[in-house]
Image (cartoon, grey):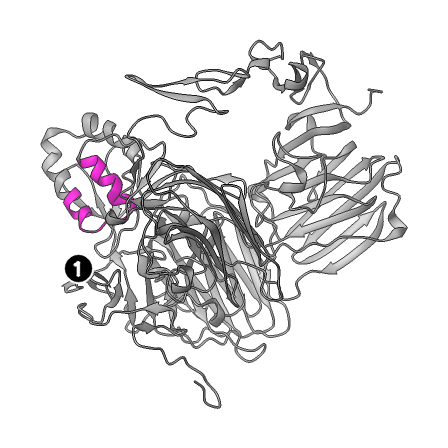
Amino acid sequence: MSDEENWYCECPKLYTGKLCQFATCDENPCGNGATCFPKSRRDAVCLCPYGRSGILCSDAINITQPSFSGTDVFGYTSFLAYSTIPNITFYYEFRLKFWLANHHSALQDNLIFFTGQKGQGLNGDDFLELGLRNGRVVYSYNLGSGTATIISKPLDLTLNVHIIHLGRNLQKGWLKVDDQKNKTVTSPGRLVGLNVFSQFYLGGYHEYTPELLPKGPRFKNGFQGCIFDVQVRTRLDQGFKAPGTPEGHPNSGRSVGQSVIASLDGKVHFAQKLCQCVNLSMILHICVSKAVPVCHCLMATHVTVLLEERVPTVNKIVFLVVILHLINTLEGSSLFYLKAFLLRIDIFISDASFRNNESSWMSFAPFYIRHKTHIKLQFQPLSPDGILFYTAQHLGTQSGDFLCISLVNGFTQLRYNLGDRTVILQALQKVNTNGNTWHLLNAGRVGNEGYLNLDGINITQKASPGMNALDTHSDFFVGGVSSLNLVNPMAIENEPIGFTGCIREIVINNRELNLTVTDPKGGANVGDCDGTDCGYTVCKNNGTCHVENSGFSCSCLREWTGTMCEQSIHCSQNMCGSHALCIPQPSSFSYTCACALGWTGKYCNTKVKFYIAKFVGNSYIKYTDPFYGKRDLQYSRLSLNFTTNQTEGLIAWMGKSEDEDNDFLAIGLANGTLKVVINLGERISVPLMNTKYFTCSDGRWHFTTVVQNQTCIKVYLDEELILFEDIDPQRKYTALNYGGICYFGGFETGKEVNIVTIGLFQKEFIGKIKDVVLFQDSKKIQLMKAEGYNIHDGNSAN
């Protein structure tokens, strides 16, 4: 609904939120204005407001060191909201300290604070935001004429407490993190004032709705850990003070607790020096809050050591008090591990077993599946219904995009929605639910074209006009979902239920999800399929696993040997030197040796030095930049000389080789011409296809330089500027987060160039490379000191 100036959504019953994206309870048992979320038809969860805790949020707590838990499984973030900071228009300074709950999810894409609103260009699109992304602090602001961003060096994770000092005077901003050098930036355009009217949010948003946020970093997760000593001043001659009216008092908040350190010394300490989990083999430190858990360190790999060796008898009563507190607060994987801890059970999962009546599920950290999704899954069902795999843009009935594989009345279904309509593919045959049949499923989509192949029988959905990208941010759920209420009703034909049966393999876009105890991000009530150490992938290369009293043994096929059939018989007695890889050649009943960098010869036992690297098609060099932590990632540069007589090939790849969403800068050849591709966050390809420069594969030396200045790209070939383009005038992404990794000529053994580069380049480089320089370093890279294989001396005639 709308009037002349504003609009709002009138939500149906049992839904709330600005876009009606959250489910709510029919009858709310929660007290003190808590948020009620229906976990199931008969079970609700109370998300407590600031200053309250307990099952029904009836207990008052005093919060002096607020702890935040990020985004929960219901889609809500923990946050504090303070009144608008006055007089922030032309000058401000902020100081704060924080502790991290972990060194994984707490560092990926997490908001620290935000104030601002979404507008239209010059009419109110101002904002101020601070967060963590890829282990670095990101500070951004927009005065109405473009975003200015400062990205710190990687955080020193040996520090328990991190200190941030940032500010802005008119257009110029600055950021100082810990003992790093101060960084500055000047915002684009001519506007000098920050006009924000929203509250000041700390730790998270009231609602994460990207559509209603201004263009900027848009951190997808809330902060995980503790934030304290937040102070601000808006004049240089003014003293610092805490935000809020009265000072230090928030207007509201949700799921915020007091940071607590529970230890085995007989005391419970409020956090003054530490708010992170440490290794359990030392002592049990559990960083929790009385409202929600901040971090859980009860990993199954540590429990036996801790229980038998590290818990003194005198402290076991105190220890059990801590455990009982955790039982009342933990859920999912942490409770799963905690139960094993209390029962003194060593959990081992080789093939995962799920039971719908026990609400079993596993979850894995998501990765990029936006343009294509290929899923291979082996399962043995005991029931004709249940969710095998689920991921969505948001968890909730109004989830946005989603992809789901499920069993419906014995038939396998693939359903996905890219934002416009739900595509449904169903197998022609039913699955066998007698518990004796393993089914092989290959399902997925490229763009909006889908396919489903069950046991070799294929069903396809042809491409059609419409949306082509799958935007998902939730975890990858296997065997069920943490709360089945959060499944989009269009994702499954009947009422959503968990899978009952066994799953022994799941591979997504050539990346296997290991269905073990330690690899999943979360899970509950998952067991082992047969209760033995034998599993589908225990014996490699189709070896047969046999249960033994001491564990298991493997019977290998004729071509393989080793305790787990991991070694080719052709390489069992190879003569390759210690600096080489043995590559089996079954067709000739022999092998070849892949020589490590600096070695050559048939068996790689001859040392070699080179200044010109010669690549022969199965070669690569991987260089780790020792100065990555000191680089300004908004201004990068790569230059080199190359020669080749080939028309295709990857010359250099500045970035990781893991996901489609990894930032990278690449140089290569396509149809004989130079091709440059750069991705700062949206996979934007910038190719050069000009017939004037079809001379790059002529066997002569060519010198090329690629310069990135935020989103402006310059490409030089033989000292001539051949490309100058601004790939994103909106400056949404401005930094090249290449991870300090540079590849030359190709990638590691087993990684095909056309797969890693998503078809941007077709094959490995054949030719020579020299004179490689990163950024504006005064010295060339010493390729001899990198790592790689099958690199020859480019000066020799071989």
Mark 1 lies on residue: 55
Residue 324 within the segment the image draws in magenta:
yes
Who's the residue at 62% across and 31% down the image? Answer: 748
Q: Is residue 789 above or below residue 75?
A: above
Residue 331 in view (yes/no): no
Q: Position of residue 529 (x, y in %)?
A: 32, 34
Three-letter amino acid code of the residue under disc 1: Ile
In this rendering, does residue 755 appear at all? yes
Task: Report the magenta residues as a range.
Answer: 323-342
Q: Position of residue 672 (x, y in %)?
A: 83, 43
Q: Is residue 1 above or below residue 616?
A: below
Left/right placement of residue 207 relative to residue 660 reads left
Q: Position of residue 546 (x, y in %)?
A: 36, 20
Q: What residue sits 63% from the left and 47% below the top?
A: 664
x and y percentages locating residue 578 in the rendered image: 59, 14
Does the magenta-highlighted stretch encompass residue 96? no
